[in-house]
Image (cartoon, rainbow, N blue to C red):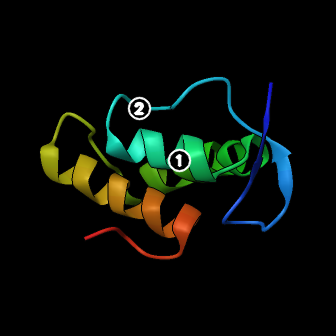
Amino acid sequence: MSDVTCVRCSQTRERMAAPPFRNALGDRIFDSICRTCWTEWLQHQTAVINHYGLDLRDPRAREFLTSQTETFLFGQPQS
């Protein structure tokens, strides 16, 4: 596995094995976020889903979670 200089923690660490999603955001995460920060997001994501009672079948809930993902990993949502 190769390393990536993570934009979230500013350290060079192990990258994920594959992009987490099959879209532009997944590619951006794969190219910019280390495995450690991605694991932290997955734990935080569970808390966000539970706190807001998100139903991921709802497109608005998925949009909200995507925004939260971008904010957590990159500091702000991508427009």
Dots 1, 2 in contact, CB < 8 A: yes
At 52% across and 31% down in the image, what residue appears? Answer: 19
Question: CA–CA distance between discs 1 and 2?
Answer: 9 Å
43 horizontally vs 35: left or right? left
- The image quadrant of residue 39 is top right
At 58% across and 46% down in the image, what residue appears? Answer: 31
- The image quadrant of residue 67 is bottom left
**Residue tagged by mark 1?**
29
Residue 28 in view here: yes
**Residue tagged by mark 2?**
21
Instruction: Count the labels in the image.
Output: 2
- Identify residue type, mark 2: Phe
At 33% across and 43% down in the image, what residue appears? Answer: 24
Viewer-nearest residue: 63 or 77: 77
Helix, strand or loop at disc 2? loop
x and y, in percent, of residue 36 in the image:
78, 46
Q: Earlier in the sequence, mark 1 or mark 2?
A: 2
Viewer-nearest residue: 53 or 4: 4
- Identify residue type, mark 1: Ile
x and y, in percent, of residue 30 in the image:
57, 40
